[in-house]
Amino acid sequence: MHIISRKPLKEFSSYHPNSKTALDTWFQIVSTNTFENFNDLRQIFPSADQVGHLIVFNIGGNKYRLIASVHFNRQKLYVRHILTHAEYDRGKWKE
């Protein structure tokens, strides 16, 4: 799957250095797999959730949340937000 873009991952890990390894691992797994649908994705990421048209990934033992728009038919994943768990709970990303 093609991830657009890696820049938010790098920016987030520069502010939250503890997230770097987990984000790098997530990137490697997603970029080297093909997911036909949400069920395929859940086989690799069982804690992923659909929230509206977005998919929320738990990163780093649930310390961080990566929110993405996934287009399975085009094999593209657009990173929308990367947040700490506390930022995610505030819900401003839904606006």
Image (cartoon, grey):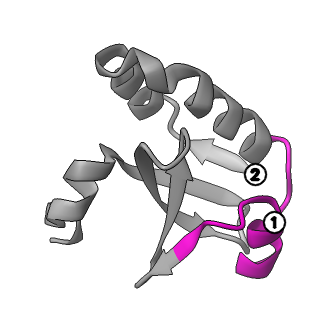
Q: Residue shown at 84%/42% (left/top)?
A: 32
Q: Position of residue 95 (x, y in %)?
A: 15, 71
Residue at which label 2 appears: 1
The magenta span reads: 32-49
Using the rendered image of the protein, determine whether residue 10 is visible from the camera's viewpoint.
no
Mark sitting on residue 35:
1
**Callout 2 secondary element:** loop
Residue neighbourhood size for the residue with mark 1, other residues' Cα within 10 Å, grouped as few (<14), some (14–19), many (≥20): many
Q: Are marks 2 and 1 in contact (CB under 8 Å)?
A: yes
Q: In the image, is 49 to the left or to the right of 84?
A: right
Q: Nearer the viewer, residue 84 or 72?
A: 84
Q: In the image, is 33 to the left or to the right of 81?
A: right
* Dot 2 amino acid type: Met
* Dot 1 amino acid type: Phe
Q: In the image, is 27 to the left or to the right of 49?
A: right
Magenta span includes 43: yes
How many circles with numbers are drawn on the protein? 2
**Callout 1 secondary element:** loop
Q: Position of residue 86 (x, y in %)?
A: 23, 50
Mark sitting on residue 21:
none
Q: Position of residue 53 (x, y in %)?
A: 45, 81
Q: Is residue 22 above or below residue 38?
A: above
Q: Residue shown at 42%/43% (left/top)?
A: 63
